[in-house]
Image (cartoon, grey):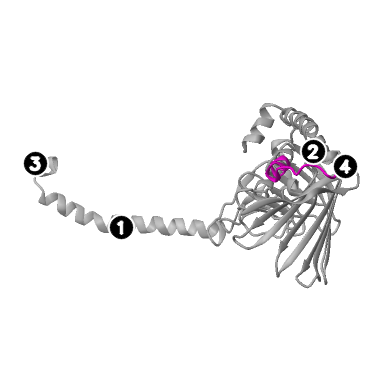
Amino acid sequence: MGAHHKMLQIYPNFSQIFRGAYHKAQAVATALLSTVCCCSLQAEVPDPSALIEGVLFARSQVGAESFHLHCIATGPTVRNDRRYLVDFESSFRRFWVTNAEVQSRMILNETNILQYSPANGDIVIAAHDEPTAALLFDPRILGITPSYSIDHTVDSLLDLKRCSQVRIVGQKPEAFGDAIAWQVRMEYVTPATFTKDIWIDPKSFRVLKAVTDVPGHWTSTSISEYSVFADGILPTSVTTRMVNASGNLMMSWEMQISGSESKRSLPPETWMIQGLGAPNETPVIDKRLMTRIGTWDGSRIIPEVSPPKGGGAEAERGLKRNLGIVVLIGILSFPLIMHYRKKKTPETIVSG
């Protein structure tokens, strides 16, 4: 269990306290930046690292959230439409597919990935590094990446130590409706050469646009819109288009958030097998061991018992056969034992 999760259990209002701290810091930042960033498009150029760190800080303050996610992925020959009920808290998350035709359920906790699919009828336990195509991403990365990988975090995607250079592009911010945003460019040379441009509102540290460009391969553009999700820290709508070097569409994503609800914390069982909602007598398979380990009874795993092949009759025959062998060995050994004892003197028997 992560430290943040433990703090939430000890102090139920932990998230509210730090959200309050965030809003106070945001107000201070607004006051400081209003004269240089927000009142004129001829504003003084801000520190790009400070803007990135502002995004990191803001998104780190998001506590427990529950929401509905509608995700539409479209390619040249494919269209995937999924609806999810999502819960997340710190690094823990649960995604329930609510489409009528596909209702799989997945949980990522501190140690495992848990999955249940009514169609397959099994509970599956897997390691964090088990390859999966399922959507089980950290919602705090919404709008800052074109790929929603299970192992991506805000810290890993905006790690200033990984990029070779970070700088402001242009001498003034760009207008996005009523907001403005500075274009921050993060340049990378390893493991591949690419750039990541992020347009950041200096007043709220919202990411309004993100472009990742891998020269000669592909470019992705994400546009984010905000409302009340996670106190307005995370976007409620993200549209992403990825094109190849020739400008042809490779894939597009539409992410829509609705019905969001902020919570102090979620029950611990949310992140355990109970959180999958699987019925009693569901088989449990551990992919790490590549074997069935038991059956779920609604509250715990009943360990798997493997009887000898052939069942009880075979076991009984095996017991009788082993007992017969022991008796035969005893009968054959008795004359040898008696002969050995006759050859020994009383003194030898006592001392030996």
Using the image, determine if residue 9 lies above or below residue 269.
Answer: above
Residue 329: which disc?
1
Which residue is the site of mark 3?
A: 347
Q: Which residues are magenta?
A: 40-55
Which residue is the site of mark 4?
A: 227
Which of 112 and 252 lies nearest the eye of the viewer?
A: 252
User: Is tag 1's residue or tag 3's residue first in the polypeptide sequence?
Assistant: 1
User: Is tag 2's residue or tag 1's residue first in the polypeptide sequence?
Assistant: 2
Q: Measuring 64% from the left and 32% from the top, which residue is drawn there?
A: 6
Residue 41 belongs to magenta span: yes
Element type where label 1 sits in the image: helix
Answer few, some or many: residues within 10 Å of disc 1's Cα (few below 14, many 20 plus, some between 14 and 19).
few
Mark 3 residue type: Glu
Report the number of discs: 4
Q: Measuring 44% from the left and 57% from the top, which residue is drawn there?
A: 320
Mark 1 residue type: Ile
Which of 136 and 242 lies nearest the eye of the viewer?
A: 242
User: Is tag 2's residue or tag 4's residue first in the polypeptide sequence?
Assistant: 2
Q: Position of residue 205 (x, y in %)?
A: 77, 41
Cα distance in 3D space between marks 2 and 1 = 97 Å
Between disc 2 and disc 4, the foreground one is 2
Which of 262 and 272 lies nearest the eye of the viewer?
A: 262
Between disc 1 and disc 4, the foreground one is 4
Answer few, some or many: residues within 10 Å of disc 3's Cα (few below 14, many 20 plus, some between 14 and 19).
few
Cα distance in 3D space between marks 2 and 3 = 107 Å
Cα distance in 3D space between marks 1 and 3 = 29 Å
Which residue is the site of mark 2?
A: 36
Which quarter of the figure has residue 189?
A: bottom right
